[in-house]
Amino acid sequence: MKKRKIACHDCDLLMLIPHLKHRQEAVCPRCGFILTRFYQHAPVKLLAFTLTALVFLTFSLKFPFLIFSLHGNEKSLTLIESIQSFSNINYIFVSILLFSTAIVIPLLFLLSIVYVSWSFNGRGLLPFTPQTLKFALLILPWNMAEIFLVSILVSLIKIMTLANVNFGLSFFSYILFIISLSATLMYFDRYQLWSTYQLKLRKSYG
């Protein structure tokens, strides 16, 4: 693979990225920003963790998320119902924002990675591969699934003083989803993905 020039995300210094070995990283000599990190078999690992995250996200939508009990009365909420509860108290915008950043955007990001990985592992590039990769990079900063989980845990501190709260299967599935998503992001490297795309493009045109 040929060396490619890359501009530092922080200071815009233009430099050549050397060939990296497993777990080696390229660091900007001016500001110390990590430009890229190379992992052996990263595309395969990326696809594996992406599919795992999709499975856990699907499970987290299907089963009870939180179970409340007070004076003998018990009520269970799914993940979507817990987000919809904000709209019931006139926080419709907050409900839409939570639904988008905690479910929709992570789902779209994972599906985009599956498409790009499928394209890279196939015989030829699938249509709209670069556009899909750009879309994934565009929506990535809006993924706030882990922040949503932390906010739920913080709010439970007060709720537990008013009622008994149990965690449903969906809650643990969502935690495993976030762990899998974090592993996906570890192998989601902008420079390495675009390098793979350029290499695959050259092979496609012979």
Image (cartoon, helix red, strand yellow):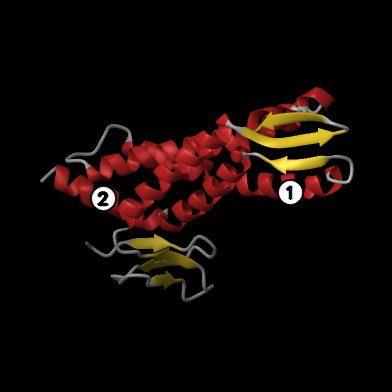
The crowd level at tag 1 (other Cα within 10 Å; few <14, some 14-19, many 20+) is few
Could you say which quadrant of the image residue 88 lies in?
A: top right
35 is higher (above) or lower (below) than 104: below
| Rendered image: mark on residue 26 | none
| Rendered image: mark on residue 153 | 1
- Give the distance between the C-alpha atoms of the residues marked 1 and 2, in whole angstroms: 43 Å
**In screen coordinates, is 91 left or right of 77?**
right
30 is higher (above) or lower (below) than 166: below
Screen quadrant of the N terminus: bottom left
80, 202: nearer the viewer? 80
For the point 66% across and 36% down, the residue is 65
Q: Amino acid at mark 2?
A: Gln
Q: Where residue 129 appears, x then y in whole percent?
A: 32, 38
The residue where tag 2 is placed is 198
Q: Where residue 89 appears, x then y in whole percent?
A: 84, 26
Q: Earlier in the sequence, mark 1 or mark 2?
A: 1
The answer to whether mark 1 and mark 2 are in CB contact below 8 A is: no
For the point 80% across and 45% down, the residue is 155
For the point 30% across and 62% down, the residue is 4
Q: Amino acid at mark 1?
A: Leu
Q: Which residue is farthest bottom?
A: 29
43 is higher (above) or lower (below) than 103: below
